[in-house]
């Protein structure tokens, strides 16, 4: 395939993925926005008023970056896992695999669709947050780059889940029993400095902690983790998951069997 043909194929996959979730925006975009607004009201206004400041910021301001990142993580992941498994279930994925489109472009197309949904939901949640907090961006480059990298990482994770899923129940196991606990324990609602020494060290094994703290640094200028370390962790995970995802796609694991 020529470059123009490859770009057209990639663009087609991306448009299809974006249309898939945008047509049902009431189910895909609106619910996380409403849910996060409830977090702002309950944790930010009601509970936050009793907690006071954290790291020199009001509790509402402190939790806003984490809640935005949580929305991006869950929606980037959910979009790809549901889309790819849907293609498997309907046997549409075979049409892509027998086409001359390179597998890496197929993978990039699904990832881009997941990133698009994650960023759109993140933008909507940010708009809602402006009604509760006076957001100021400390470092725009760090803020935007860590958001995109995080969305890419969890889009890849969603792809892997979609490959291994054997039923619709399987696409909810990882988000329920792994992703959600790691997200809530990733420092959204608290600083790990508040934890006992043992649990501070245990928290460092949670990769989501690094993403949330890097994003919080981009917004507020404060972080429990060195930003360079956060970037190194995120890039390492993206690299590993991308090559593993491409390996699964090349083998046709869970597709051709």
Image (spheres, grey):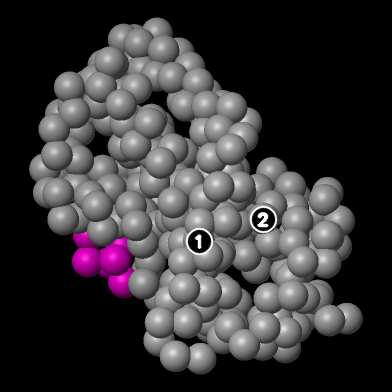
Residue toward you, 241 or 223: 241
Q: Is residue 133 left or right of residue 47?
A: left
Distance from label 1 to label 2 (Cα)? Answer: 12 Å
Near mark 2 (Cα within 10 A), the count class, few <14, some 14-19 or many ≥20, is: many
Q: Which residue is mark 1?
A: 14
* Residue 68 showing in the rendered view: yes
Residue 83's tag is 2
Near mark 1 (Cα within 10 A), the count class, few <14, some 14-19 or many ≥20, is: many
Q: Is residue 224 left or right of residue 162?
A: left
**SS category of the residue bearing label 2:** helix
Q: Is residue 165 left or right of residue 16?
A: right
Do tag 1 and tag 2 residues touch (Cβ < 8 Å)?
A: no
Give the vertical position of 173 relative to 104 (above or below). above
> What segment is highlighted magenta in the picture?
224-232
**At 29% across and 66% down in the image, what residue appears?**
231
Q: Main secondary structure of the magenta part?
A: helix
Give the vertical position of 71 relative to 16 (above or below). above
* Residue 74 showing in the rendered view: no
**At 74% across and 62% down in the image, what residue appears?**
87
């Amino acid at each position: 395939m020529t470059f123009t043909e490859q770009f057209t194929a990639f663009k087609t996959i991306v448009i299809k993925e974006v249309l898939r979730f945008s047509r049902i925006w009431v189910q895909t975009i609106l619910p996380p926005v409403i849910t996060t607004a409830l977090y702002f009201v309950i944790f930010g206004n009601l509970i936050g008023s009793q907690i006071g400041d954290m790291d020199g910021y009001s509790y509402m301001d402190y939790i806003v970056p984490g809640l935005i990142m949580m929305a991006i993580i869950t929606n980037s992941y959910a979009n790809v896992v549901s889309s790819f498994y849907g293609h498997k279930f309907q046997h549409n994925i075979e049409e892509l695999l027998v086409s001359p489109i390179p597998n890496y472009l197929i993978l990039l197309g699904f990832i881009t669709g997941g990133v698009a949904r994650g960023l759109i939901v993140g933008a909507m949640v940010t708009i809602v947050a402006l009604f509760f907090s006076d957001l100021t961006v400390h470092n725009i480059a760090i803020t935007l780059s860590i958001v995109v990298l995080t969305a890419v990482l969890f889009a890849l994770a969603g792809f892997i889940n979609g490959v291994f899923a054997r039923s619709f129940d399987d696409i909810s196991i990882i988000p329920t029993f792994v992703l959600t606990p790691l997200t809530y324990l990733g420092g959204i609602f608290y600083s790990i400095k508040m934890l006992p020494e043992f649990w501070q060290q245990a928290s460092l094994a949670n990769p989501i902690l690094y993403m949330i703290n890097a994003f919080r640094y981009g917004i507020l200028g404060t972080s429990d983790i060195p930003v360079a370390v956060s970037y190194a962790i995120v890039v390492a995970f993206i690299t590993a998951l991308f090559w593993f995802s491409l390996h699964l796609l090349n083998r046709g694991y869970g597709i051709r069997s």
